[in-house]
Image: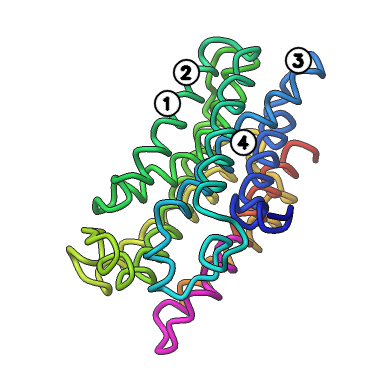
């Protein structure tokens, strides 16, 4: 077992996106706090996210084989037992490290850790429910950070969370469409495309992404510090263009889902940077 395999197992890029989301919250909301808190703010979502992805690969070995996914477990780089051990370790440390942030932050960490277990065990097979859980785990970081530091929630963190949630939900629905055959064969899943069809699922994913785009534009007109912030609008515009390109691809004959997954991840990352820029300029 090597570090590269562990990073792939835990989808480390997603954990770093959550660290970026914490940093975005701190700067955009101009939050003041003792510097040592930053370690706990970074590491709690980082570890809970890494736990969830490792656990996902543990439960989805057969599905991943059917979907030709070269995960570290499928390729033999990491055994199922070691994957479970890594997941459990990250889960425990991720929850414990939230304690210095206060009881409210601790409860949020516990709730989302439990949801990650339930998602991987069964809820990912339930139409839309699993997609919503994943998208909420992306959005909650803004609220988690503000509650941990000041104990309150502002409209800014709510709207940053909502736009992230809707963009993440659209991306997750697209992924569910891509994985439908393997999910059904390996887990007898009743995911969204199984119940309403691939085409309708794609429409719903697209609507969710469009809602995220509208949310990002609304923030330019109404939510401080994004309000009338040209620097924010420019960077957010790049994110919006990438989302629109992903939508055009998903409706093309090629159905380039791998490219779409990469594009939407890039769009979400740039969207986070647009929030950050609004807090700086």
Distance, label 3 to label 2, CA atoms, is: 20 Å
Question: Disc 2 designates what residue?
Answer: 107
Proximity of marks 2 and 1: CB atoms separated by less than 8 Å: yes
The residue under label 4 is 47
Residues at circles 4 and 2 in contact by the CB criterion of under 8 Å: no
Which quadrant, please, contains the C terminus?
Answer: top right
Position in image of residue 213 (x %, y %): 50, 56
Q: Point out the frontmost of discs 1 and 3.
A: 1
Q: Residue furthest bottom?
A: 253
Image coords of residue 46 (percent x, y): 64, 37
Query: How far separated are the C-alphas under marks 1 and 4?
Result: 14 Å
| Contact (Cβ within 8 Å) of mark 4 with mark 3 | no
> For the point 50% across and 39% down, which residue is it?
139
In depth, the one of 249 and 109 nearer the eye is 109
Local SS, label 1: helix
Res. 75 image quadrant? bottom right
Instruction: Please say which color scheme the image uses.
Output: rainbow
18 or 52, which is in the foreground?
52
């Amino acid at each position: 077992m090597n570090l590269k395999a562990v990073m792939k197992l835990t989808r480390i890029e997603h954990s770093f996106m959550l660290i970026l989301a914490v940093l975005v919250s701190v700067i955009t909301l101009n939050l003041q706090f003792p510097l040592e808190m930053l370690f706990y703010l970074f590491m709690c979502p980082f570890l809970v996210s890494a736990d969830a992805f490792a656990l996902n690969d543990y439960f989805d070995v057969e599905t991943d084989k059917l979907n030709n996914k070269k995960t570290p477990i499928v390729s033999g780089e990491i055994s199922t037992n070691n994957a479970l051990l890594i997941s459990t370790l990250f889960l425990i440390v991720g929850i414990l490290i939230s304690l210095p942030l206060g009881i409210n932050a601790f409860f949020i960490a516990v709730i989302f850790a439990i949801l990650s277990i339930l998602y991987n065990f069964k809820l990912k097979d339930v139409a839309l429910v699993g997609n919503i859980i994943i998208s909420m785990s992306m959005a909650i970081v803004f609220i988690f950070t503000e509650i941990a530091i000041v104990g309150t929630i502002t409209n800014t963190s709510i709207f940053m969370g909502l736009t992230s949630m809707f963009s993440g939900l659209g991306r997750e629905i697209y992924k569910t469409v891509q994985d439908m055959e393997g999910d059904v064969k390996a887990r007898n899943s009743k995911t969204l495309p199984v119940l309403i069809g691939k085409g309708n699922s794609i429409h719903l994913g697209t609507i969710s992404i469009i809602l995220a785009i509208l949310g990002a534009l609304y923030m330019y007109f109404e939510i401080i510090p994004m309000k009338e912030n040209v620097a924010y609008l420019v960077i957010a515009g790049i994110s919006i263009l990438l989302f629109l390109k992903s939508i055009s691809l998903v409706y093309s004959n090629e159905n380039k889902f791998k490219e779409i997954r990469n594009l939407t991840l890039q769009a979400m990352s740039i969207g986070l940077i647009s929030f950050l820029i609004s807090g700086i300029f």
